[in-house]
Image (spheres, helix red, strand yellow):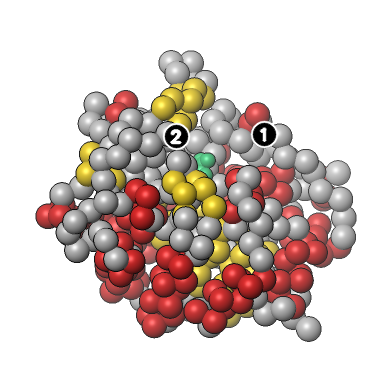
Amino acid sequence: MTSLFDPLDLGATRTANRVFMAPLTRMRATAPGDVPNDLMRDYYLQRAGAGLVISEGTQISPEGKGYADTPGIHSAEQVAGWRSITDAVHAAGGLMAAQLWHTGRVGHESLHDGALPVSASALEFRNRTSLKDEDGNVVRANCPTPRALETDELPRLVDDYRRSARNARDAGFDLVEVHAAHGYLLHQFLAEGSNQRTDGYGGSLENRARLLLEVVDAIIDEVGADRVGVRISPIGSFNGLDSDDDGEGGLFVARALAERGIAFVHLSEPDWAGGPSLDDHFRSQLREAFPGVIVGAGNYDLAKAQRLLAAGLVDAAAFGRSFIANPDLPARLEAGLPLNAPVLETFYGGGHEGYTDYPALADA
Ligand code: PHB
């Protein structure tokens, strides 16, 4: 029987195990310029034992930034910063994916010189984002009603994604993951509640998925389908967005991605964010829609991951909070050893505390 500690053929790569590090916003990039730094390198290097390290969301453009001090992947300085991180992870025998992120309406005008965040439609919604005050403390702020993107801006947006994928390749990433989940821009187009467009990008599910698939096709053109993954979060409520379609949007996207032969679909299950638990019926529908590699995530523990792996419903599992607290998580899980508890107060912002100072067992 396959175990989480077996290798996995993942597109153009082969991972050493199936315990992946989930993408995790940590808000510690260097300002100004949102540049990945040595502290971030140390953090990722500590976690290089993951079968695949997936980077925190990294904005594809200044417009795509929605939180303070998140890193970008649109400037030469940022690419150089990421390069030193991927070099370190590779030297330790790991693999790394860049999560390409545009937060859309989840953002704030103070991050954009006063310009409003953009989205599919200019709809009022209730949600907050995280900024920093003058002392670097994280403060929460309401997201404003966004500006709707014009139809003739969308080719530029697709180009921003394309360029970010090229930059990810130049920065040494093995794979890219398109963030199409959690109520960020591509999900805002996909979901009916946030998309009231009357052009070819709104209305039918096919139209609402169009931007995502154009983005994926541009990225495939740039790096090859076998280096592309897409993260989706069907069902549940994220960032002021309700996926009220019983998962139909996610299944439609998964079928379209299967036709393209991408390396993986990353399913973020809603219960990590207080949403409902997915059932095996939905997971089986997803498996039918996407016969390639499915990475499952969202409040997984070892038992849940092993069960879904044995049932053929996922091929790997990504761990978030437990990877924050346990740099050597795969080794601990494999040996059945206890886990450090994550400290919520240091998830976002700050320095090394709660970031690079969680002990590995070898330190104990
Ligand atoms: C967050 O910063 O809370 C966050 C970021 C990206 C996600 C989900 C949550 O996909």
The front one of 228 and 272 is 272
Residue at position x 66%, y 57% in the image: 277
Residue at position x 72%, y 66% in the image: 305
Indicate the quadrant where residue 214 lies. bottom left
Q: Check disc 1: other Cα within 10 Å, few if <14, some if 14-19, many if 20+.
A: few
Indicate the quadrant where residue 287 lies. bottom right
- Disc 2 C-beta below 8 A from ligand 1: no
- Disc 1 C-beta below 8 A from ligand 1: no
The amino acid on which the numbered mark 1 sits, given as a three-letter code, is Leu
- Where 312 sits versus 275, above or below? below
The front one of 278 and 91 is 278
Residue at position x 38%, y 56% in the image: 191
Number of the label disc, if any, that sits on residue 274: none
Q: How many marks?
A: 2
The front one of 26 and 179 is 179
Number of the label disc, if any, that sits on residue 344: 1
Q: Quadrant of the C terminus?
A: top right
Q: Check disc 2: other Cα within 10 Å, few if <14, some if 14-19, many if 20+.
A: some
Tell me if residue 54 can be seen: no
Q: Earlier in the sequence, mark 1 or mark 2?
A: 2
Where is residue 179? Give x, y as percent. 43, 56
Viewed as shown, does residue 205 lie left or right of 172? left
Q: Which secondary structure lies at badge 2? A: loop
Viewed as shown, does residue 80 lie left or right of 281? left
- Where 309 sits versus 176, above or below? below
Q: Which secondary structure lies at badge 1? A: helix
Where is residue 310? Give x, y as percent. 74, 78
Q: According to the image, label 2 marks what residue?
A: 127
In front: label 1 or label 2: 2
